[in-house]
Image: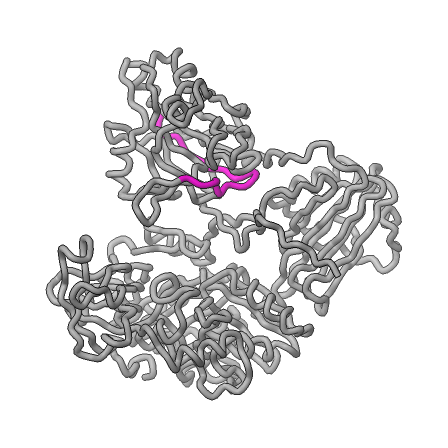
Amino acid sequence: MATQERPRLLVPGLLPADPTRETYRVRRGAATAVELRPDDRLTVRDLDGGQPAELTVVTADGGEDYRALGAAAGGLVEASVLRRLAHAPSAGGAEIVSGLARRGHDPSTATALGLFGPTSRPGAEQTFRAEREAIVVVGAPEGPSLLEGGVPASDLQLEIRRADARRDVEPSLPEPLADPRLDFQVDRASALAYEVKAGEFIQLIDVQGRQCTDFLAFNAGRLQDGVERGLDSTATRSLMGSAWPQPGLFAKFYDTDLEPLVEVVRDTVGRHDTFGLACTSKYYEDMGYFGHVNCSDNFNVELDPYTIQPRRGWPAINFFFNTAFDAHNLYVVDEPWSRPGDYVLLRAMTDLVCLSSACPDDIDPANAWNPTEVHVRVYPATQRFSAAIAHRVTPDAEPELTKETGFHERTSALTSRHTEYNGYWLPTAYDNHGATAEYWACREQAAIMDLSPLRKFEVLGPDAEALVQATMTRDIRRLADGQVVYTAMCNETGGMMDDGTVFRITQNNFRFVGGAEHDGVWLREQAERLGLERVWVKDSTDDLHNVSVQGPASRDILAQVVWTPPTQTPFAELRWFRFSIGRIGGPQGIPIVASRTGYSGELGYEVFCHPQDAPAVWDAIVAAGEPHGLLPLGLDALDMLRIEAGLIFAGYEFDDQVDPFEAGIGFTVTADKEDDFVGKEALVERRAHPQRVLVGLELEGNEPAAHGDCVHVGRPQVGVITSGVRSPVLRTNVALCRMDVRYAELGTEVEVGKLDGHQKRIPATVVRFPFYDPDKTRPRS
């Protein structure tokens, strides 16, 4: 029997070469419209399961005709999503509503064919064949709030199989972000100059994916004075202290006068070269390609009208150019990360003369060996765009832009210092306080912190316990309703996929709170592998935003505002790793979940609420905490707290190559757990034959250790620093270190390497950790 050969090269996320297939996404709470022609086949797919769909079929004359898809018109339901969009159009929804109105259809009275339901399986699908032309609108309705007994909504997928293959299989341009003032294409192997006014926005779009575009900008005002002031690599890198651009307040590019010319507002790729040379004739000549068209010469032609002196090589921002330095510190190039429609959005800080190229490089991976075009749009300064970086959960997933949490309205009023964390903007420190003051507030009084970027997943159904038991290192069957447990989630080799907490809400309802968005994908994959057909994994991150209230006064503060019904454990009586479902302000107040958990080493709680209620929850807690000295707390202070308390962090203490014993949380691997779980066999072996272990180090002197510093005994390296901090309460430098077990004994003397690891050494001693309150008497109090 012939077996299907595995493809030699996997390139997920790019447009497939099938001209008859199209896919679209229907976001939760939103709608997507597609146009069908005779004999086209439409498949509606419930990716995560348990998600209803509303399918409305509109004909050319504005009527609804479900027989156009071969469906019966009986049993129709109200098209709740479409009706809501008719009364309150949203981004994307307004276009659907206006399009239907042009056909004479009134979306406010729309009906729909109801598909799927609360028990539909993950991947459930229904296919229709178009008998005649029609517009099909598919909505993904949201149900009641999760905190009021609802189930999180999830996305749907639409797949169209065209009866007639598309003539053009190339990607189409994405829709403009607003009405552009300039809108033009830079043809492959060419460059164009254009002028931009201060405050205007420049969108550089990779139309077909994996195509680099070099960018130059000059101060237009200085050019009129006869002075050339363009983007300068040395000034920018010195002022930014970073080789890579990032959106936000500090993502600026400067000239030699240290004046900012542009700032990055959005970046959907995350991988660029800042100030490599635009390709030059010399590069191609040295490779044996004489006379090859190049960006630098193309720029010189475009710059001639501006009397700018030509150069053989122009230092440029090389957007979408994927460069790196390898283990030998050599400069290397690989294919760009950009996908069709990816873009960078810049804001002009002054009047500019700009140049953009579509790089002609076809002799190396710079443009994936196939140069294509680039598109440029310029938007008026009156427009407003959120600052964002995009990320993808899987390589072929839609990009997700950085979001604001439900508490952002309150935190942003207190500080402008935000950083992108796990897909959201979070404060690093607060104005008039700073990390040290925030740290002491948590240690001595109380602090409140936005931790909404934590990923939440509801695991529901009769097979829910079996799935959680099979994927967590803890024995989940021992968990009682209303109890929380801290656990690891490992792969088959014993490496940690993530750490997190499992909430047992009822017999068949669990909530996993972790740090990685991929956790939900992993759980669904394991459910399918195990053949668990009666379990649903639903992402509830957008339904539950949370603040952490930590510190000795946290119980007294929250006891003033949290009401719990008689069926729940009274808030003041919550023990460590327990939770109650209650409300803020009394029986008719805001629904919340309050858990006695945290990440500070202090007595503390986390309060979960719906994002729309977040400002009111913040206000209630802050008002109650003011007499107790409550302060807001940012990421910088949190890092100090968690290192002192010996709490681990993904990418520092662990990754998928590090097991829980090496990460310092071997206690999460239940030794007598009878049921099998992912990684169990490997972890039995690793427990019996450990190679590395997490230890605490106390350093001499006042110089701290940093993540990645090597640790030596003599010349050989015996460990690596995972995290380090100068402890305010201990008044010394401490660090967490992944150490060879032979040097893990308390009192062992080692040296932390600086510079090249040998020219400078800081003496250190292995000490007990957690460094602060090692017996955890404070969180247990």
Q: In the image as oriented, which residue stretches furthest toward the left?
A: 701
Left or right: where 1 falls relative to 271: right
Q: Quadrant of the C terminus?
A: bottom left
Q: x and y percent of residue 757 in the render? A: 19, 57
Q: Is residue 290 above or below residue 50?
A: above
Along the line of sight, the residue nearer the viewer: 431 or 456 = 456
Left or right: where 125 falls relative to 235: right
Q: Quadrant of the N terminus?
A: bottom right
Chain part drawn in magenta: 333-350
Along the line of sight, the residue nearer the viewer: 718 or 627 = 718
What residue sits 54% from the left and 28% below the top?
373
Q: x and y percent of residue 381 in the render? A: 45, 30
Q: Is residue 217 above or below residue 48?
A: above
Q: Is residue 222 visible to the viewer in this orientation of the structure? A: yes
Q: Is residue 627 visible to the viewer in this orientation of the structure? A: no
Q: x and y percent of residue 544 in the render? A: 51, 65
Q: x and y percent of residue 283 in the render? A: 38, 26
What residue sits 36% from the left and 70% below the top?
549
What residue sits 50% from the left and 48% below the top?
401
Along the line of sight, the residue nearer the viewer: 538 or 80 = 538
Along the line of sight, the residue nearer the viewer: 183 or 294 = 294
Q: Quadrant of residue 770?
A: bottom left
Q: Is residue 527 magenta?
A: no
Q: Quadrant of residue 176?
A: top right
